[in-house]
Image (cartoon, helix red, strand yellow):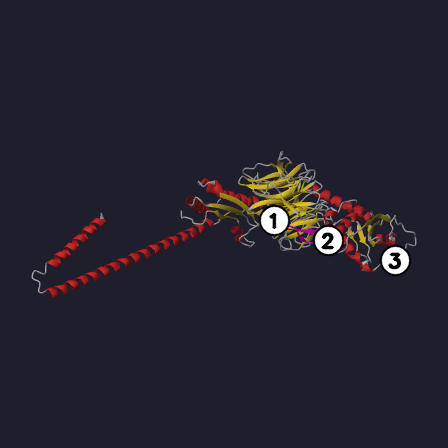
Amino acid sequence: MTGAWRSGGLAVGVSAALLTAGPPDRLTAQDTSAIDRGVRVGIIYRPGVRPGMVLLPVHAPALDSVRAIMTRDLDYSDRFELITLPGGDSIRVTAAAPGARPPAAGGTGRGTGGGGAAAATTLNYPLYQALGADFAVAVLPASGDSTIVTVHDVAAGGVRRELRVHLPALKDPAFRLAVHQLADRVLEAALGAGGTAATRVLFVMEGKVYAIDQDGADQKLVSSSDHQAMSPAWARDGRRFAYMEFWEGHGRLFVQEVASGKRAPVATTGQALDFTPAFSPDGKTLAFSRATEEGTDLYTVNFKDGCCLQRLTVGRFYDNLSPTYSPDGQRIAFVSTRAGLPQIYAMAADGTDQQLFAPFDYGATGSSNAPEWSPDGQTVAFHRDVGGTLQVFVLDVRTRAVRQLTSVGRNEDPTWAPDSRHMAFVSDRSGYRQLWIIDVETGRIRPLLQKSGARLPAWSPRLPETASSTP
Amino acid sequence: MKRLSLLLLSGLAVAAVAACGGGPKPEPPGPVTANTDSIAEAQRLEAERQAREAAAAKEREEAERRRQQQIADSLAALGKSTEAVRALLGTMIHFDYDKAIIRGGDASVLDQKVAILQANPGLRIRISGHCDERGSDEYNLALGNRRATAAKQYVVSHGIDAGRIETVSYGEERPLASGHDEEAWAQNRRDEFEILSGGENLKQP
């Protein structure tokens, strides 16, 4: 850990403290978009305060794409300053050429069989430190068709961790997910935090459900019928997801297995307009909205057995919709029009103890919709009408403070990454509605998918390895 | 009664002809001339009878043709009526932004539908509620549901059995106008009415 990094972390902490200490009615936007319009306040994206990381060049062609995918993943984690070696990848700045010969000075190889990996463990640490690197990552081929990834702690001058993996072949559909999982392990080794590389985002486009890797690669169609689909939602284990389809004007819910691609209709749905499904964290219950002539209300159902339909809200003259569970499964945040315009409310998972969740000024605050509870349980993201357009907001669950996150264009339908700091959402900031990703900590924004009409994103949890084949 | 008097009249006519035939020959000039005269008379009478019969047949034909035409006309009229009723039934109603309240002007449109449903007891319809693209995608499903329900409640409150009307919502998923301005939005904030069953022959209310 370098001194520069520590002071950088302190700077962020101080500015965050200043923000929360400010007047509560002043919204602090954090939108640092590539399209620069007007002045924005908030935490400024400052390169250099995050730990530097360098991914050492590889000379095995098969590992080039591994390194490229990992570099992008680690960059997109927004937790490192990715360092490009002077003169690009052509210059070798290692003390010992990896894989060329055994290290002269004995090295610090830690019980690995591959001679090449052992060679990579001796780096010219002071040189990397001079380049601003806190971590150096080497990707090397090893015996038995495996790959060894070494995470060097440059400041400490030693190996932080060595990961030996057996990667699928480049053309194997499981290849990309395996590399993403490797990138998450590197992040975990360096910082002790969980990454988001091995995740996918479901979304709706032209009435169909698609999946895409969080780095924007590998877009796949996952819905299998001609019925118009909406509102995909992940189960916490990443092995299945739910979505709604229109059937003769009714809304029918389906649960689909990721690995097999097989889907099953949820019994007890499809006779009315059932929509916005949400899995309980234990994966047993599906909460959803049901629109009837009495209005729209929230229900839960045991989707595996197709039983135990339970009504949670009774709003004869108003609507209740869009449920989202807290990660402990105890509470459900949802949208209700009980005060006129839709706003964010919360209740116990059995429907009791209903109360306002995101405070608003009656008659002044615009409609609030599409809540999603963050995986760490601390915040609920939603969008709110501000002056005729929609903006993404975050509610602090403990303090009930509401913070505006976006300000450029129309921004809606936020969905949390499993690290609870990245968020995918729909924005027309580039001229048409497409999917974007924001890092809530730094305000850094990148497009996820540059296709018009993509909407209703749902970010997966960290995906298990068996989820690699499909979608 | 009419037929009886016709018979009486024709009886009188026959008697008159016989009386005439008898009258102008107090002293017949000769049997030949008399015979010639009566033959000519019989022939003339026969021709007249045939002409009358032909005219009557022609008249009957004409009447039959007219009758057929009338049936065809009324069938066409019935078809036209079904079309007209369908068009009336399909007239959409529109809503203000984020509202599900029936506008004053649209009440008369719904009154027509009430009358049609009353005149055609076998008719069942589906009302679908739709929204413009401005609101939240999922909230719009609930809003469209309220719009469809508002129209149904109006019709039911005017005496139509609730079981004859189904409601659905498509939110903003099926826009009519593809533009991104108030004109398109106003067109898209609507209820659509479609026939579920019993719409083969519709009577004008």
Gap in angstroms between the C-alphas marked 3 and 2: 32 Å
Which numbered circle lies on residue A100? 3
- Dot 1 falls on which chain? A
Side of B76 relative to A150 (left or right): left
Question: Mark 2, residues whose alpha carbon is within 10 Å: few (<14), some, or many (≥20)?
Answer: some
Q: Give the structural element (helix, strand or loop) at label 1.
A: strand
- A256 and A201: which is toward the camera: A256
Toward the front, the furthest residue is B31
Q: Which residues are magenta?
A: A208-228
Identify the residue at horizontal 86%, vertical 56% (top origin): A99
Q: Give the structural element (helix, strand or loop) at label 2.
A: loop
- Dot 2 falls on which chain? A
Gap in angstroms between the C-alphas marked 2 and 1: 25 Å
- Residue B188 makes an appearance in the image: yes
Q: Main secondary structure of the magenta part?
A: loop
What type is the residue that disc 2 sits on? Pro
- A24 and A124: which is toward the camera: A124
Residue, disc 2: A173
Instruction: Judge depth for marks 3 and 2 and give the one in front.
Output: 2
Residue, disc 1: A229
- Dot 3 falls on which chain? A
